[in-house]
Image (spheres, rainbow, N blue to C red):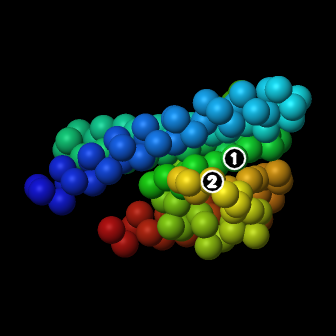
Amino acid sequence: MLRTLCLNLLRKRTAVDYDQQKKPLDAIYAKSKMDIFVATYSVFKRKDGSFFSQTLWSNGVDSLLPEADTLALGIDPTAKNFLIVPWELAFPLLHDLMEREEGLAPVRYRVRTFPRTDQIARLRTAAETAKGSS
């Protein structure tokens, strides 16, 4: 119970930090006419009262991703085709596409290239295997 409360507070605090970071980054990129999407760190509440964080990596969008509990891959957002996986599963399989942006705290990763179909398939398999074992 205490652990859940502490983690909930941590996620809310991290959301504030990422939001405070996002606003000036958006302004810098707009002023310099750089088309980089600064992704949001969103916090959601589960039915059991615990919270989790999520960010979105959209296909075809040069982005700066925050590190979150879950990563929503927008394979085809117009068709509502998303794959949502835990960060700890996604990062080892996709880290070669994620470049840590130096000088940012909290950490963000620059993603210029969306995962290939085979990487998505491996990630989907890993997520299903992890779900089945929990």
Q: How many marks?
A: 2
Name the quarter where the N terminus is drawn.
bottom left
Indicate which disc, 2 or 1, sits on the residue closer to the N terminus.
1
Q: Amino acid at mark 1?
A: Leu
| 25 on left or right of 67 | right
Residue drawn 67% across the image and 57% down it: 103
Residue drawn 60% across the image and 36% down it: 22
Q: Where residue 104 is drawn, which disc sits there?
A: 2
Residue drawn 55% across the image and 44% down it: 55
The residue that mark 1 highlights is 64
At mark 1, the secondary structure is strand
Q: Amino acid at mark 2?
A: Leu
Name the quarter where the C terminus is drawn.
bottom left
Residue found at the far left of this picture: 1
Tell me whether the residue at label 2 lies in contact with that at label 1, contact meaning CB atoms closer than 8 angstroms.
yes
Q: Position of residue 90 (x, y in %)?
A: 59, 64
Q: Position of residue 39 (x, y in %)?
A: 63, 39
Are there few (<14), some (14-19), or many (20+) residues within 10 Å of tag 2?
few
Q: Is residue 98 visible?
A: no
Q: Position of residue 85 (x, y in %)?
A: 52, 56
